[in-house]
């Protein structure tokens, strides 16, 4: 199986890979045309690879398109699991819509920037001034009810399976639980229904590589968001490698088994 990757960090433990620098994608079209799979392209490369060069990419096209924008992500989640989302409104940032949000939501509530990750662009809105400042910086209002959480769940899906899951525990008084922002980690006591829900929704949407973030409130699971290129800090600390899971999935997707001696030329 011939594999090309644009991200050596995320495919470090997958054998038989040719690496290409993202900015050299068009210089190496011949190598790419011979590849069975192209792994971890940057978002700006996706359309050229899929529609131009007719390559199969990993993560999937749906993973990229839905994971790139929280607005599109939420609309897709509404279509397959509406009972598992916090109350959310998405509206243009007009003066009338700003006032409507302020009438509909009580403080505090959460406002998000549609294209951001790792906790960046997620704001706890505690007063009118804070929301007006947020609205002035964003063309789209993405507003959710505030869920009082001391921890949330990260469920990692590769292919068709949840391969890891853990709690992200915020520091005392912290709003964000993200590991990248100092949150703690616990792999204990993860409810199996969270894994089953993430697997079902991933399959429904065609997502084959993502970290799904969920909240558990009064026995009900809620999706907060998912990240296609999620942080691996907690997994690395646990000694969990995703490369074998990725390779098993790709080998089971209709491509002949990996032949370690069949390498593509190295891109210089």
Image (cartoon, rainbow, N blue to C red):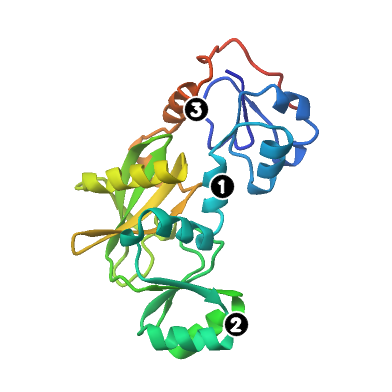
Element at badge 3? loop
Which residue lies at the image location 60% right of the left edge and 82% below the top edge? 136
Point out the residue furthest to the top here. 261
Disc 3 and disc 2 in contact, CB within 8 angstroms: no
Residue 147, x across and y down, in percent: 30, 70
Quick one: label 1, few (<14), some, or many (20+) residues within 10 Å?
many
Residue 143, x across and y down, in percent: 45, 74
Distance, label 3 to label 1, CA atoms, is: 22 Å
- Residue 156 in view: yes
**Residue designated by label 1:** 64
Q: For residue 24, what is the image quadrant? A: top right
Does 23 sit above or below residue 98? above
User: Looking at the rendering, in which quadrant would you find the C terminus?
Assistant: top right
**Residue designated by label 3:** 13
- Mark closer to the observer (3, 2): 2
Element at badge 1? helix
- Residue 225 in view: no
Q: Which mark is residue 136?
A: 2
Residue 255, x across and y down, in percent: 53, 19
Disc 3 and disc 1 in contact, CB within 8 angstroms: no
């Amino acid at each position: 199986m011939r594999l090309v990757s644009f991200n050596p960090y995320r495919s470090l433990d997958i054998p038989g890979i040719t690496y290409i620098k993202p900015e050299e994608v068009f210089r190496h079209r011949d190598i790419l045309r011979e590849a069975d799979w192209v792994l971890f392209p940057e978002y700006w490369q996706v359309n050229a690879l899929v529609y131009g060069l007719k390559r199969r990419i990993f993560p999937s096209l749906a993973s990229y398109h839905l994971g790139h924008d929280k607005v599109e992500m939420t609309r897709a989640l509404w279509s397959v699991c509406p009972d598992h989302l916090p109350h959310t409104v998405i509206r243009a940032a007009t003066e009338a819509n700003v006032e409507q949000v302020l009438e509909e939501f009580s403080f505090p509530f959460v406002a998000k920037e549609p294209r951001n990750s790792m906790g960046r662009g997620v704001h706890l809105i505690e007063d009118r001034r804070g929301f007006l400042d947020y609205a002035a910086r964003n063309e789209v209002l993405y507003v959710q009810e505030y869920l009082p959480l001391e921890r949330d769940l990260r469920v990692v899906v590769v292919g068709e399976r949840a391969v890891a899951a853990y709690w992200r525990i915020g520091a005392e008084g912290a709003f964000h639980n993200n590991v990248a922002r100092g949150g703690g980690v616990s792999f204990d006591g993860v409810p199996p229904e969270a894994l089953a829900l993430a697997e079902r929704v991933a399959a429904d949407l065609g997502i084959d590589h993502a970290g799904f973030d969920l909240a558990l409130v009064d026995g009900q699971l809620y999706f907060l968001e998912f990240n296609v290129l999620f942080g691996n800090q907690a997994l690395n600390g646990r000694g969990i490698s995703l490369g074998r899971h990725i390779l098993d999935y790709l080998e089971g997707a209709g491509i002949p088994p990996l032949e370690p001696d069949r390498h593509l030329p190295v891109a210089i």
